[in-house]
Image (tube, rainbow, N blue to C red):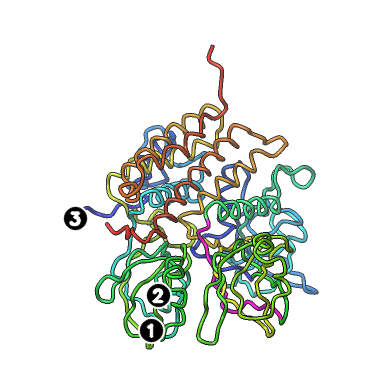
Amino acid sequence: MAIAGAGYLTALDVLCDLSYQLFEPIANTVITSISSSGGEFTLGVISSASLYAGALIAVGYGTAQVEITTVDLVVNSTTIKVGLVNAHNVGDKIFAPTFPVQQPTDPLWTQAEMLAYLSSACNDFLTDVPLVYGVNPAVNIQPTQQNGLLPSDCMEPMRVAFQMPVGPYPMRETSQANLDAYDYRWQSAQPGAPQVYFRDKMPLQNFGIWPRVNNTAVFEIVYSRRQGPMQLLDGFLFPDMFVPVVKYRTLSFAYSKDGEARNPGLAKYFAARYEFGAKVAGMILAAVNDPNLEMAQ
Amino acid sequence: MATPVTLYDLLPDVLSRIEEDLPPAFNSPPTPPNPDGAPDGPIFWNLMGEVYVQMVDAIFEAAMATGLVQLSNVQVTLAANTTYFALQNNTSIGIPKGVIAAMRMRAPFSIRKTTLKALDDYQPAWQQTTPGSQIISWFPLGLSYFGIYPQQAADSQVVMDFIYSPINQTRPYDGTQVVPLQQEFNDILTQYAAAMLRSKEGGAEAEEADVVFQAFATRMKKLSAFQMRMDSLDYSPAFGAAARVNPREVV
């Protein structure tokens, strides 16, 4: 299931942009016939250029039935074999940035690699500029436990509030070191309504509370979100306006890898473009969050 | 009032900056208007895959730098007994898709903007307040949510202003997209697009593209809505690192 983005662009769109920038052809063809046998579909296509066994392609691109599938076999220049789940028609579009240059022996870039670069770029961007937030009103810590799990897409909790019967009450953030100094027996304190939370000296993606609670404790957590590993049809958590920034970051990764297409100059150039974009996006965030600014013209 | 400009209108400027041919029959009869042959371009760049995309990226960056694309007087319905409201993918309450950030809330007069932290500091039990009929303040949560204090006892109508994404549609771009910026942006948008198209050529071409981009950034700084309200040096240091692509020795 593709992740709906805040805007309209998808990872597939951006990888197509990157393909053009990196002189990689794009698979862009149309289904001319469909037949199936034993769960495998044989598709007649206008051209199988840029397709190869193992390539991920979007079948039915631009329709509600679009799906990502893997090319099982390129039979000839007008026939491919794939597995399909959704219903498709003759005339449906097949579209994908397949990064076919030097496939299958020594590709300059692979789809998986570029998707990983893009995911990393998104998370770099969201680390530099935490634009995207989540609100989870029901994060639990089990009875008498000191720690609990943060939401899986939480990059950093911004605010933790204890859910009391009359509504959430914010807790102050502290550290275990601070609690040690405050009261060395703090972990043995009588259970009660939690007053503070901390994130140090504990497993990743956990947070701790003091004091513990005898019953299941429920917390409302406001947090900055991370973008998970992206698939081709996934959208971006941030609006389309910021997508060029992560595109430049991805390009800096692509140009800086070892290999025939390495280009330190362009890698540096696009890294600087990313820095500039992140700086400007940071200004937007600062202005958006500033209570003294309405930014109305 | 000036006629809206589309990507198609700006296309000749972009393509001529990269010495490319116009698409067949561009604003002309299908017969060849070019004595050297029919216009059949662009040849080295893909029209829908690259040229229009770079033009839209130019609009995105211009809008990001200036914050000038805004949507005003949007009626939003705030559900009862709710503190947080999603800004993205929340069209059911009246927020259009493509919204970037909330700028102002009125009901019917302007409601004070605050922050989540300020509410926590000033009145920690603010979320335990009995839902009422008058919003006292609202606060943003990045680009994802906004919140109100106190919750409303019944569904309420407010009027909001937003920063808005300048282009709101799925790919491919076909040239009919309207440039939602003032006329003084047009020239720099085409410069940006041409510069980005050249950057893939690497080497000296990219170096020159970088110079054009710096001109773009400088112009955006002058046109920025944020810039008027923030430190005038905000834009400069980040781009200081850009330096040059493939520095060369001059002999």
* Number of the label disc, if any, that sits on residue B152: 1
Q: Is residue B12 magenta?
A: no
Do the residues marked 3 and 1 share a common chain? yes
Between the C-alphas of marks 3 and 1, the distance is 42 Å
Disc 1: CA contacts within 10 A as few (<14), some (14-19) or many (>=20): many
Question: Which amino acid is tagged 1?
Answer: Gln
For the residue pair A293 and B13, the one nearer the viewer reads as A293
Question: In the rendered image, which quarter is residue A210 located in?
Answer: bottom right
Q: Residue B241, relative to residue B176: is it above or below?
A: above
Instruction: Name the spot of residue B12 as percent of width and height, x first.
Output: 36, 41
Question: Which amino acid is tagged 2?
Answer: Ile
Q: Is residue A141 magenta?
A: yes
* Number of the label disc, if any, that sits on residue B148: 2
Q: Which residues are magenta?
A: A130-142
What kind of element bears circle 2? strand
Could you tell me which chain the residue with mark 3 belongs to? B
* Number of the label disc, if any, that sits on residue A3: none
Provide the residue designation for mark 3: B1
